[in-house]
Amino acid sequence: MIGGITALLVCQLAGEVLVRLLNLPVPGPVIGMVLLFLALAARRRAAPEELGRTADGLLSNLGLLFVPAGVGVVLHLPLLARDWAPLSLAVLAGTLAAIALTGRIAQALLRKNPG
Amino acid sequence: MNELADIWVYLAREPLAALAATLVAWLVAVRIHDACGQHPLTNPVLIAVALLASGLLAAGIPYRDYFAGAQFVHFLLGPATVALAVPLYRQIALVRRSAAAAVAAVVTGGAFAAAAGVAIALSLSAAPEVTASLAPRSVTTPVAMGIAEAIGGLPSLTAVVVILSGIVGAALGPLVLDLLKVRDWRARGLAMGTAAHGIGTARALSVNATAGAFSGLAMGLNALATALLLPLLWRLLAG
């Protein structure tokens, strides 16, 4: 578990350093994700078991990690009261339209390539 | 009475209470979610946030004091984002043959999801920081919060909007796909993962393994494409 978490933290750290060095407009952990993916792909083998266990453990409780930031909604109650209409319309209509469009495009593109 | 006040001062100062409350609220939320047959509308993130937010408001505790303790949970979002590379790597072998079609569909759908949110917010004259918080709406939360911060949105508002988008997509998305006769499980998974990230992926996984794998792939691809492209486009368009 320590090995797994170390690998994740080292990739994140490398990502943060790269973002600052190259002035990238992307969050450091995202670059860390790319670095870890490239490292796994370069090995051309299954992901190390320890890393896999740590990643699965973190990702199976992913929801919990959103909670502290989500509670920050208490800071924005006036904003929510003011802009509830665009917020709820964007969330509802925007999300369902995106699902519809992505589904249709994917099905059309995949038709040439049956599973 | 004095003693009680001392205890209160201790609890408010130390991170222990906020940390424990966050974990207890999460466990309660998961229990409720399970008791309701894991119905997407009883999303545990939503329930836990509602419990803690109403607790803070009722007790008059400032968010900053709460976050001083809860930041230890929040910190794990970074390593968890890096960890998304592992399922992506596992699935890339599985979906390699459909990779080109998947990338094209996810990038188009992801761009549309971001544009639709911004267009709706602009047309209803939302505040600029609300518009910026809506742009990364369809991306998994840790990535979306980072993007929102980079383009002048409010990360905590983004987290709420992202979670709500995921719940809407997971609950109503399958009905939309049925209506449009999207029956290919790969296409259904890609649509759910692109627009409803991890919450949509959890739902897709529970229905069909192929849909789940493609949904996870779409979530990772969309997170990456949006994180790379949205801040650049935003900088170009917003000047």
Image (spheres, rainbow, N blue to C red):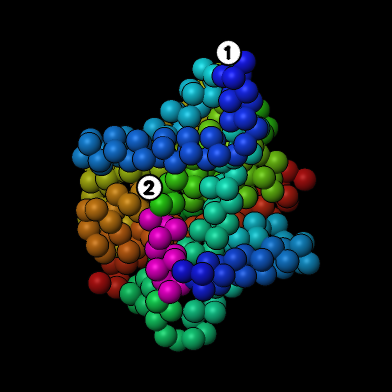
x and y, in percent, of residue A114 in the image: 25, 72
Using the image as rendered, state which of residue B7 and residue B190 is in the foreground: B7
Query: Quick check: B78 above or below B132?
Result: below
Using the image as rendered, state which of residue B4 and residue A53 is in the foreground: B4
- Using the image, name the chain to which the residue with label 2 belongs: B
- According to the picture, the residue beneath numbered tag 1 turns out to be B1
Magenta region includes residue A20: no
- Residue at position x 44%, y 41% in the image: B23
x and y, in percent, of residue B172 in the image: 30, 39
- According to the picture, the residue beneath numbered tag 2 turns out to be B199
Element type where label 1 sits in the image: loop
- Image quadrant holding the N terminus of chain B, namely top right
x and y, in percent, of residue B59 in the image: 54, 19
Residue kind at label 1, given as amino acid type: Met
- Residue at position x 22%, y 53% in the image: B207
Residue kind at label 2, given as amino acid type: Ile
Magenta region includes residue A53: yes
